[in-house]
């Protein structure tokens, strides 16, 4: 069990549209092994982002359990959850990733700042990651001075800097050209392979799934199918 | 364009907060404006009523030229007058308990008495012989019922009359108080008592000429022994005082308006910023800048007009309320609703529109500076160039004002004050930007939440707006209360600093008995004889400027006056010269000298008792606000010798022993004279009660300023929170805990107040100097001081307010959904 980074048991999520209840996620159960790289695919509106938010503890499920690193996040206290978000999970959103009144640098450093750690200790990492995303020259710029793709790269950098155990990314390269997209995906792959970090990404691009080791196809709130890209590698275990 | 207008209107309905705020700011100012007009109107009307009603609206009074001779009706030529009411009018005194009241006894024929209802008519049936009619108020207050008898002292002669009936407190009885009231007795009775059969001494009448003066002139040229005058004497002084009150109200209103203008202007700025994307869409569809500006202006006008209409209603409400509470006899059911002139409605609407348009014009015209491309692409943020001019202009102002403070050129204190305040307000955003950016850099490592709070203040329009708003609000409140305090100090000081313990008022009707009284009756060992002196204060005027003439006993006056600084060698010298002058001399107050262009050594023509004499001005002395500031000090003997003027005298003295006992003794001893004896303490109490009203008026304005500012602050805080929700959600997603979020919001609030605190003290000083200067420009020379105690009080209030305004957000934290905030606007 401790081998699983994420474990999902009978997860349901529904929203109320007026009086009508809309079931978005329907009794999902699966677990993600530590150090695996999972891609979630599926048609627009099938509940991918919703699932990712639940995994990140940004929203509460209607029912079911989410266990991250052995801890049921539904049972975590508010500040424990906040700590988990800062230290254990890095999140890259589909939209709106950056705090507009902070510089690029401070946006990347935010989890560290919020955690009360010294920014100085991360100087080298910061420089490295800025070089990697090729935005060193924009260090002091504010997000509104950046293009959409640049903003996305900053968000990825932030998710990586703290070296969290789990990285959740919602279409991280959706706004990027193929070259920049490849750079980010290679980055994901390398931290997955070299540091053994667990990565879950939502994507529409078949190509980007190839950087990972398994794919879940979601449709209408249920897992339609799953495939393992590396039969012997780590992956997803679905309990049906 | 119609479409944009439609959009504007629907967004007005949707984003109610900002629009209610706008409306509220306009409403408050315009309401105060209308209420200031209305309430002072009511006061003036009440006052005018108090003397016109008492004279039964007869504006002419006819008396005999020689006061010792009565009027024989058949000898009077009634040219120029009509509707005459001949009467015998005598002053009397009515003693009750240990107090006494001055009674004006009017001997009238029954047919000349106006009755207003059946009860009053019936009362006249018993109105024969030693009977009298008094008012309901006097009956109630002095416990006099129908058929009771009361004893009066009229012309040193005791008479006893029985109450035949009670009249409403209208007409003759309108001005009745416990201290002084009117009484009607049958003419025949009074004529018999005073040995004046067939004679009258005061005929009141209305004129037949085109004006009162014309009628009076006509009458006077036709009569040799009788003289007609206007019966409404001495009204101008009081009316001027009320008008002066109105000006002070307007001055206070100006401060409140400034506050409203800031709120309106910042609301518009926010509204426009929020609409930028839509404006962009309209630009992309071919709308021109003037199109957009016109719609915004129309919107501003509309809000002004709505605010104006509402404020007319609110102001009228306040006026009605005030009329009710100020009406002297409302307990007796005598109360007339005031009529509010219809043009006040127009004024209110104009006021609202002007205030709204003037305050919003700058943000609206900013549209002109926008680059259409940027707006369409959603990139129009701030106008950097504008910010730079702002910074330069502000720093320029500050430098000039500091230089001026250093150089200290006399008389231009206002300029540097205006520059200082304007400079601070202009550089404020930049100043905060620079300082917080520095602090953020230092703090982000150590106290992250604090650093983030600072950073938010730097970048949030609303929080910056809150600082400006709070600063101006605090300034308004401090200025208004300080002005109120100063005026109160002036009023109480002018009184408190006078050294006496007992005061005996000898009304002019009592005749020239003051000196005899002092010599024969007050020559007692329990009165400090060195301080026993008389004082009379009465109005004079020259070239339309009204002033007070104070008749003093020059040998003793300094022992009485503790208000003017006579210890100053310069002043003392002037006084000595005045005291020893061989020619009739005066000392003139500096402010009056300034207003009339008088200098030491001049001859001042003075008209008293219809006699004009030129008096030598020995010197000018700063008399501060003594009797309103415009004062001529003249010796009582000079008044007697030069003008043969007696007037109402106040005899002041210190007591060697217990003043209350002295008062009671004197009341007994002087019971045969028509005089009033009171102690200093009694006067002081009355004085304080009088001041309460003024203070209440000032409190109202401070309160309004606070209320407007509070609404502004609450609203800004709310908007700023709504606008920052998305970022807070993001921060949450990255791991900001709830406590951290709460701390962030609290720190923001505290920093806002801290900034206000930092700037408030210099600004307050500047504001106080400025107000003092401005008030002196309109002839009010108040010594306005900053009362520092208000600074922490106001700041404390603001802190509580802003913390309270963030409280709902803090408590609501549980229901905060990160996902929803990030997804939807
Ligand atoms: N807060 C909400 N209230 C109501 N319905 C919601 C809410 N959030 C999401 N939904 C609905 O849930 C469904 C899943 O949404 P979700 O954002 O997870 O889709 P997605 O798979 O990420 O789609 P895409 O690929 O377009 O990003 C959608 O039908 C959406 O309308
Ligand atoms: Mg999605």
Image (spheres, coloured by chain):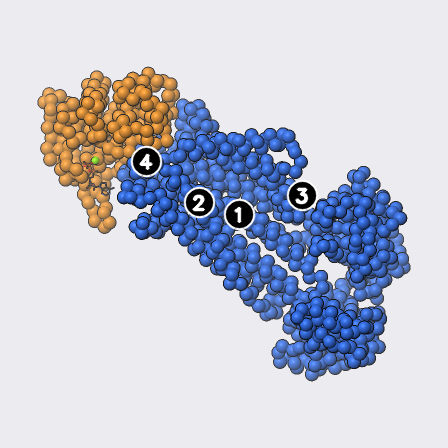
Chain colours: A orange, B blue
- Closer to the chain start, of discs 4 and 3, is 4
Query: Within 10 Å of the Cα at label 2, are there few (<14), some (14-19), or many (20+) other Cα atoms?
Result: some
Q: Position of residue B726 (x, y in %)?
A: 33, 37
Marks 4 and 3, Cα distance to the nearest angstrom?
54 Å
In the image, taking residue B324 as reference, residue B817 lies left or right, namely left
What residue appears at the point 40 percent right and 47 percent down from the top-left corner?
B18
Q: Position of residue B598 (x, y in %)?
A: 75, 47
Q: What residue would you read off at disc 2?
A: B361
Q: What residue would you read off at disc 3?
A: B783
Q: What residue would you read off at disc 4?
A: B374
Label 2 resides on the chain identified as B
Q: For the residues carrying marks 2 and 1, which lies nearer the camera in this image?
A: 2
Q: What residue would you read off at disc 1?
A: B256
For the residues beneath circles 1 and 3, the answer to whether they share a chain is yes
Q: Position of residue B637 (x, y in %)?
A: 86, 55
Inspect this view and state whether residue B658 appears. no
For the residues beneath circles 2 and 1, the answer to whether they share a chain is yes
Q: Which SS class for mark 4?
A: helix
Q: Which SS class for mark 2?
A: helix
Label 3 resides on the chain identified as B
**Nearer the observer, A1 or A27:** A27
- Closer to the chain start, of discs 4 and 1, is 1
Marks 1 and 3, Cα distance to the nearest angstrom?
22 Å
What residue appears at the point 38 percent right and 40 percent down from the top-left corner?
B368
Marks 2 and 4, Cα distance to the nearest angstrom?
22 Å
Query: Within 10 Å of the Cα at label 4, are there few (<14), some (14-19), or many (20+) other Cα atoms?
Result: few
Query: Within 10 Å of the Cα at label 1, are there few (<14), some (14-19), or many (20+) other Cα atoms?
Result: many
- Closer to the chain start, of discs 2 and 3, is 2
Query: Within 10 Å of the Cα at label 3, are there few (<14), some (14-19), or many (20+) other Cα atoms?
Result: some
Q: For the residues carrying marks 4 and 3, which lies nearer the camera in this image?
A: 4
- Closer to the chain start, of discs 2 and 1, is 1
Inspect this view and state whether residue B67 appears. yes
């Amino acid at each position: 069990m401790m081998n699983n980074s994420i474990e999902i048991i009978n997860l349901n999520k529904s929203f109320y549209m007026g009086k009508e209840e809309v079931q978005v996620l329907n009794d999902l159960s699966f677990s993600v092994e530590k150090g695996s790289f999972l891609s979630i695919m599926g048609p627009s509106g099938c509940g991918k982002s919703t699932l990712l938010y639940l995994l990140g503890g940004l929203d509460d499920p209607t029912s079911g359990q989410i266990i991250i690193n052995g801890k049921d996040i539904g049972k975590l206290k508010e500040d424990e959850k906040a700590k988990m978000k800062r230290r254990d999970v890095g999140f890259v959103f589909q939209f709106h990733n950056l705090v507009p009144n902070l510089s690029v640098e401070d946006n990347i450093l935010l989890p560290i700042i919020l955690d009360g750690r010294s920014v100085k200790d991360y100087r080298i990492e910061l420089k490295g990651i800025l070089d990697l995303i090729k935005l060193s020259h924009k260090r002091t710029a504010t997000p509104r001075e950046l293009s959409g793709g640049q903003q996305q790269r900053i968000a990825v950098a932030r998710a990586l800097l703290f070296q969290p155990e789990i990285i959740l990314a919602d279409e991280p390269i959706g706004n990027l050209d193929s070259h920049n997209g490849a750079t980010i995906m290679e980055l994901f792959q390398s931290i997955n392979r070299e540091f053994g970090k667990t990565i879950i990404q939502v994507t529409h691009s078949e190509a980007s799934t190839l950087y990972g080791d398994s794919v879940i196809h979601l449709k209408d709130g249920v897992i339609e199918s799953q495939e393992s890209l590396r039969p012997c590698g780590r992956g997803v275990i679905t309990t049906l | 364009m119609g479409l944009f207008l439609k959009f504007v209107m629907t967004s007005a309905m949707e984003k109610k907060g900002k629009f209610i705020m706008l409306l509220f700011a306009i409403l408050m100012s315009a309401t105060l404006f209308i209420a200031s007009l209305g309430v002072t109107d009511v006061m003036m009307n009440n006052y005018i009523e108090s003397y016109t009603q008492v004279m039964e609206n007869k504006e002419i009074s006819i008396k005999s030229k020689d006061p010792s001779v009565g009027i024989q009706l058949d000898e009077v030529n009634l040219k120029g007058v009509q509707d005459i009411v001949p009467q015998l009018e005598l002053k009397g005194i009515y003693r009750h308990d240990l107090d006494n009241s001055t009674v004006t006894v009017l001997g009238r024929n029954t047919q000349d008495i106006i009755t207003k209802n059946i009860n009053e008519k019936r009362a006249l049936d018993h109105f024969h012989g030693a009977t009298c009619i008094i008012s309901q108020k006097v009956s109630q207050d002095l416990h006099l019922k129908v058929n009771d008898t009361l004893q009066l002292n009229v012309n040193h002669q005791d008479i006893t009359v029985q109450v035949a009936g009670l009249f409403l407190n209208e007409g003759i009885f309108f001005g009745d108080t416990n201290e002084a009231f009117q009484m009607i007795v049958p003419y025949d009775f009074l004529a018999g008592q005073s040995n004046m059969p067939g004679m009258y001494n005061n005929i009141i009448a209305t004129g037949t000429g085109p004006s009162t003066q014309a009628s009076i002139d006509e009458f006077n040229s036709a009569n040799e022994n009788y003289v007609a005058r206007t019966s409404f004497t001495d009204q101008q002084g009081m009316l001027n005082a009320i008008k002066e009150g109105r000006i002070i109200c307007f001055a206070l209103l100006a401060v409140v308006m400034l506050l409203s203008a800031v709120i309106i202007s910042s609301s518009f700025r926010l509204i426009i910023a929020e609409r930028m994307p839509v404006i962009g869409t309209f630009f992309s569809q071919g709308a021109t800048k003037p199109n957009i500006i016109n719609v915004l202006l129309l919107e501003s006008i509309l809000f002004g007009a709505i605010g104006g209409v509402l404020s007319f209603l609110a102001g009228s409400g306040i006026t009605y309320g005030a009329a009710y509470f100020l009406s002297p006899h409302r307990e007796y059911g005598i109360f007339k609703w005031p009529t509010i002139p219809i043009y006040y409605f127009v004024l209110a609407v104009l006021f609202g529109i002007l205030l709204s348009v003037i305050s919003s014009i700058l943000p609206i015209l900013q549209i002109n500076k926008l680059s259409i491309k940027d707006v369409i692409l959603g990139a129009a943020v701030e106008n950097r160039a504008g910010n730079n001019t702002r910074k330069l202009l502000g720093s320029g102002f500050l430098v000039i004002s500091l230089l001026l403070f250093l150089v200290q050129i006399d008389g231009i204190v206002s300029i540097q004050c205006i520059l200082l305040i304007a400079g601070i307000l202009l550089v404020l955003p930049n100043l905060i930007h620079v300082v917080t950016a520095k602090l953020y850099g230092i703090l982000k490592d150590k106290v992250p939440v604090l650093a983030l709070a600072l950073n938010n203040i730097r970048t949030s329009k609303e929080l910056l707006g809150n600082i400006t708003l709070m600063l101006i609000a605090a300034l308004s409140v401090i200025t208004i209360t300080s002005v109120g305090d100063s005026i109160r100090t002036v009023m109480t000081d002018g009184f408190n600093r006078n050294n006496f313990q007992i005061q005996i008022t000898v009304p002019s009707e009592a005749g020239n008995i003051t000196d005899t009284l002092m010599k024969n009756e007050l020559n007692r060992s329990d009165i400090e004889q060195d301080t026993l002196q008389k004082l009379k204060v009465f109005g004079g005027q020259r070239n339309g400027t009204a002033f007070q003439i104070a008749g003093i006993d020059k040998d003793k006056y300094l022992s009485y006056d503790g208000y003017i600084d006579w210890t100053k060698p310069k002043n003392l010298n002037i006084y000595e010269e005045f005291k020893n002058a061989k020619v009739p001399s005066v000392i003139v107050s500096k402010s009056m000298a300034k207003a009339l262009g008088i200098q030491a050594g001049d001859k001042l023509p003075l008209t008293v008792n219809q006699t004009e004499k030129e008096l030598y001005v020995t010197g000018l002395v700063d008399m501060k606000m003594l009797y309103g500031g415009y004062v001529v000090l003249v010796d009582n003997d000079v008044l007697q010798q030069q003008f043969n003027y007696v007037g109402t005298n106040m005899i002041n003295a210190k007591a060697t022993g217990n003043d209350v006992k002295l008062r009671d003794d004197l009341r007994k001893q002087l019971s045969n004279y028509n005089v009033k004896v009171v102690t200093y303490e009694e006067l002081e109490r009355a004085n304080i009660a009088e001041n309460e009203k003024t203070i209440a008026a000032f409190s109202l304005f401070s309160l309004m300023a606070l209320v407007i500012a509070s609404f502004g602050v609450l609203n800004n805080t709310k908007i700023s929170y709504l606008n920052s929700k998305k970022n807070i959600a993001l921060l949450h997603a990255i791991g900001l805990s709830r406590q951290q979020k709460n701390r962030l919001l609290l720190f923001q609030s505290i920093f806002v107040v801290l900034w206000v605190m930092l700037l408030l003290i210099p600004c307050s000083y500047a504001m106080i100097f400025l107000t003092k200067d401005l008030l002196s420009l309109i002839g009010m020379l108040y010594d306005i001081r900053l009362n520092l105690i208000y600074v922490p009080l106001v700041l404390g209030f603001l802190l509580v307010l802003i913390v309270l305004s963030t409280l709902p957000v803090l408590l609501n934290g549980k229901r905060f959904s990160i996902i929803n905030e990030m997804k939807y606007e």
